[in-house]
Amino acid sequence: MKEIALLPENLIRMPSVNLVNDWYMRSFQEIIEFEKTDITPKTLEYFCNSLVKIRNRHTDVVETMAQGVLELKESHDVDYHTENSIQYFLDRFYMSRISIRMLINQHTLLFGGTLENAPGPKGNKYIGCIDPQCDIVSVIKDAYENARFLCDQYYLDSPALIINESSHHDLEPEHGIKIVYVPSHLYHMLFELFKNSMRAVMEYHACVDKYPPITVTVSKGKEDICLKMSDKGGGLPRSTMEHLFKYMYSTAPQPSKADAHTVPLAGYGYGLPISRLYARYFHGDIVLLTCEGDGTDAVIYMKI
């Protein structure tokens, strides 16, 4: 809330930013009530229920904040200094949102009594929202299938997927590369990257019968697990590369307000910067390498 108050005045006045600020004020008022209450089973249950209510209230924060920035762009000329300060604010704001949601999810799953030690896919036992044996390939396939569904709706076709796995020669080969991770975070990053790659491939090869596949290589080293997604979507000019992680930039047309509750294939320009925050939250990163006229490689680094 203090960070929102430090935003450029023009942005604070936007209706969508006001709405987000109101959500945070209401949530803060609700949570502060617990500071002086006695700890009883009933209070703890009420606390869990309040957290779930707060989490649900803030579901659309990213889209609403994006709408606020669009409102600013439509109504004011945004100079370089203002854009930089908005970029800095949004990085901090969304990183703290990832952190708060992680804590809320972890608490409600462990103490809400409904999903304690719930078995995940293939019988793995989650610890809250953390999977100690996160099967990377199954998350890749899941993200691909959902992105492909969207791609098929838009373009009536989609590129195929090829997955390769490799390990550093000192490391024992395993039955699939596993990692301690939050599967929903990995899914979010992969889903965004798949959407970008699919759109690039479909639009670059608009008049062919068979589209080149997207290749994902999963590689386990001594320090990191790397996921490299390679497409043949024609790449991007170097001049646009530096803009790809900016919140106020998108290569796609802006989604219409009527589409607010559907998942657009692209348009807000938030997919990449927020995906990189998810990677950096656990000391990883996302790096993009592009060859104009060929395609793009996106690498997700995850700390072991």
Image (tube, helix red, strand yellow):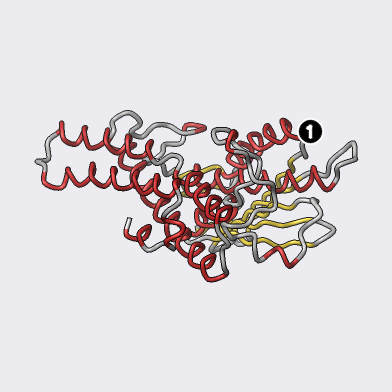
In the picture shown, does residue 144 fall above or below 280?
above
- Helix, strand or loop under label 1: loop
In the picture shown, does residue 188 fall above or below 258?
below
In this image, 70 relative to 101: left or right?
Answer: right
In this image, 160 relative to 2: left or right?
Answer: right
Q: Pointer 1: what residue?
A: 157
Snapshot quadrant of residue 104? top left
Q: Residue furthest bottom?
A: 81
In this image, 173 relative to 29: left or right?
Answer: right
Seen at 79% across and 62% down, the residue is: 291
Snapshot quadrant of residue 79? bottom right
Snapshot quadrant of residue 246? bottom right
Seen at 55% across and 45% down, the residue is: 188
Residue 162 placed where, x, y %? 74, 43
Residue 282 placed where, x, y %? 46, 57
Q: Residue furthest right?
A: 208
Q: Residue furthest left?
A: 38
In which quadrant of the rendered image does the N terminus lie? Answer: bottom left
Residue 183 placed where, x, y %? 50, 43
Q: Give 38 or 123, whichever is nearer the viewer.
A: 38
Badge 1 density bin: few <14, some 14–19, many ≥20, Cα 10 Å = some
| Residue type at numbered disc 1 | Asp
Q: Give 242 or 77, whichever is nearer the viewer.
A: 77
Seen at 22% across and 37% down, the residue is: 47
Seen at 77% across and 63% down, the residue is: 237
In the picture shown, does residue 182 fall above or below 243?
above
Q: Residue furthest front?
A: 75
Q: Give 269 or 141, whichever is nearer the viewer.
A: 269
